[in-house]
Image (cartoon, rainbow, N blue to C red):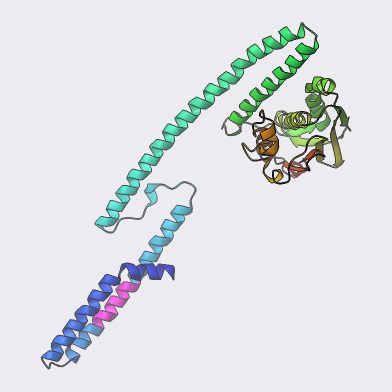
Amino acid sequence: MRVWRSYFRAHTKQIVVYVLFCAIFLLTFALYDLPLAAVLYPAAICAVLGLILLILDLISFAARHKGLLALYSEAAVTVKRLPRAKSLLEEDYQQIILSLFQEKVDLENRMQSRYTDLIEYYTVWAHQIKTPIASMRLSLQEDDSPFSRELTEELQSIEQYVEMVLCYLRLDSASTDYLIRSCDLDAILRQAVRKFASQFIRRKIKLVYEPTGFWVLTDEKWLQFVLEQLLSNAIKYTKSGGTVSITMNEPGILCIGDTGIGIAPEDLPRIFEKGYTGYNGRSDKKASGIGLYLCRRICGNLRHRISARSSLGSGTVICLDLNRTQLERE
């Protein structure tokens, strides 16, 4: 019905002109006392022919409308598939569309070039900054004192932020490849825990870890990044003397919990959004709101699920559902 209404609205002028001409002929014949049949008969024939042409034009109009809708619904719209123009005005409109389309293509090319340059610059920067970080770490290892150990942990945080930058750059990169294979989850967890061993010791945080004995179909490097992010958050928001736990109460459901400050109920639904820090982020000026966002993105690419439950003052539990990939191996 929408097509019909649109068509008749566009051709209202022609219909009104036809009816007006018929009325003029009828009035003229009536004023001169001429037989009305002489005008009614040709008018009826013209009406039938006009109706046939109107129906054919309506069918053509509906087909063109359907074709344009199909073109609009495609992922990539091109001007090559536009219907042939039937009038000078349609040609003018198509020229405008062609001009706008070309401008869009040029703008996309410029933005893609700038984005590529930006990615290349920050990728080189991230790799170059690892050299002075490694040099500083070697220098700090020569002085085994509380101050040097504290500086080493801060340096580890810098390394983690650099890895976050590289991860952020690689997520949308066409060159990012995932090596999906069956991995020993406990081996990945031990590597992640070993990285934060000094923080557990210095801050006197108890680690509760139960070996899972689980093998997961995943990319080891990317999953380890996720686990390190979750452990880092758990340590960051847990006070001295608290507990961080790594458990698997259900097969394939890995939970990393802490006894930290917890997350406000109004913040919990949004903690995986990019840049969202919530109440904890406002109190901790170092929070960037990127870590959990990256975890969600990576888990989505690996076909894992990530969820959280928490309450203020009683800690947070982040759960990874690692079962989904078991049926999606390629």
**Magenta stretch: residue 269 in it?**
no
Q: Position of residue 201 (x, y in %)?
A: 84, 21
Q: Position of residue 262 (x, y in %)?
A: 77, 38
Q: Main secondary structure of the magenta part?
A: helix
Residue 157 in which image quadrant:
top right
The quarter in which the N terminus is drawn is bottom left
Foreground residue among 21 and 275:
275
From this view, report whether residue 276 is shown above or below residue 61: above
Residue that sits furthest to the top in the current view: 142
Residue 229 in which image quadrant:
top right
User: What segment is highlighted magenta in the picture?
Assistant: 45-55
Left or right side of 205 for 63: left
Rendered residue at 57%/19% (across/down): 125
The quarter in which the C terminus is drawn is top right
Rendered residue at 83%/20% (across/down): 202
Rendered residue at 23%/74% (across/down): 17
Left or right side of 47 for 145: right
